[in-house]
């Protein structure tokens, strides 16, 4: 049985409607009622989507991600998993310090904030948290971006090499837009940048543990250095030329932003 809790104080993208919370089968769920009219704990159970013949496959990356067909359209459902050494021992549980500090709640609201600023991110649909004593598990569902692939996949494909320089220029410009509003993307890597080759559009995803503050050149450089390390893992020999193209796009976008502010 579902029990409605309360509306969150944060406004929706239209400046009027709010997100809704409900509790079902031990899960607290936050969702956008403009996109979803009815949601339950079943949305966070793979068996439910299989029964509906709406489990479309998996997505690459850390943790468990799946493509699902929801009433709002195709979406990406991600269950939060720990990485690195802690993930070997505590796979998907986090210390409970309050609902608003959970990974899913923070990423849902941050993604929505970036979307409201006109930045290229997926639309968040729902977040869920299930508490068990001093720990919790979490999930996030976002709309799936159509006709995109991870930048990493594009860079490694022999079919797209002629498009790479111009595409990486766009990647740099995209990253600069996020840094201009003060985003610190703590896991900027070639798989968290999605590209659409037809029109060379670029999106940034996965804002777990990311922060929005004041623009900071040191944080921006730290993000770019992390991206460079990710590119080295793909191909150390071509990383230098890749980063040159990315930094050129970043610099051109910075100059354009500065010129707009002056005018």
Image (cartoon, rainbow, N blue to C red):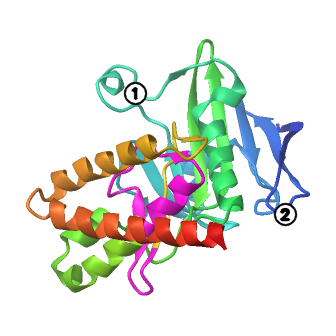
**Residue 88 seen:** yes
- Residue 41 in the image: above or below residue 157: above
**Left or right: 171 with respect to 182?**
left
**Left or right: 6 with respect to 247?**
right
Give residue 259's mark: none
**Left or right: 53 with respect to 195?**
right
Give residue 91's mark: 1
Residue 8 occupies quadrant: top right
Q: Residue furthest right?
A: 16
Q: Residue at x 56, y 68 (%)?
A: 257
Label 2 neighbour load within 10 Å: few <14, some 14-19, many 20+: few
- Residue 60 in the image: above or below residue 252: above
Q: Residue at x 40, y 21 (%)?
A: 90
**Magenta extent:** 173-201
Q: Position of residue 225 (x, y in %)?
A: 30, 47
Q: Residue furthest left?
A: 237
Label 1 neighbour load within 10 Å: few <14, some 14-19, many 20+: some
> Dot 2 lies on which element?
loop
Of the two numbered discs 1 and 2 on the same chain, state the one appearing first in sequence.
2
**For mark 2, what is the residue?**
14
Residue 88 occupies quadrant: top left
From the image, which quarter does the N terminus lie in? top right
For this rendering, which residue is in front, 202 or 80? 202
For this rendering, which residue is in front, 112 or 52? 112
Q: Position of residue 87 (x, y in %)?
A: 35, 27
Q: Position of residue 111 (x, y in %)?
A: 62, 51
């Amino acid at each position: 049985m579902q029990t409605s809790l309360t509306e969150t104080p944060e406004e929706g993208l239209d400046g009027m409607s709010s997100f809704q919370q409900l509790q079902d089968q031990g899960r607290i769920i936050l969702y956008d009622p403009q996109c979803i009219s009815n949601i339950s704990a079943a949305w966070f159970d793979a068996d439910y989507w299989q029964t509906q013949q709406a489990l479309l496959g998996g997505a690459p990356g850390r943790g468990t991600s799946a493509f699902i067909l929801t009433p709002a359209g195709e979406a990406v459902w991600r269950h939060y998993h720990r990485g690195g050494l802690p993930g070997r021992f505590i796979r998907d549980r986090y210390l409970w310090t309050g609902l608003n500090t959970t990974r899913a709640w923070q990423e849902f609201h941050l993604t929505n904030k970036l979307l409201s600023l006109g930045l290229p991110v997926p639309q968040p649909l729902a977040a869920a948290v299930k508490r068990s004593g001093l720990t919790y598990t979490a999930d996030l569902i976002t709309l799936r971006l159509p006709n995109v692939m991870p930048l990493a996949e594009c860079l490694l494909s022999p079919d797209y090499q002629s498009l790479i320089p111009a595409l990486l220029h766009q990647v740099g410009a995209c990253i600069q837009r996020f840094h201009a509003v003060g985003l610190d993307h703590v896991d900027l890597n070639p798989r968290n940048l999605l590209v659409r080759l037809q029109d060379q559009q670029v999106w940034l995803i996965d804002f777990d543990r990311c922060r929005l503050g004041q623009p900071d050149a040191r944080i921006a450089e730290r993000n770019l250095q992390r991206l460079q390390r990710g590119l080295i893992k793909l191909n150390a020999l071509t990383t230098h030329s890749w980063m040159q193209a990315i930094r050129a796009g970043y610099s051109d976008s910075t100059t354009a932003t500065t010129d707009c502010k002056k005018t």
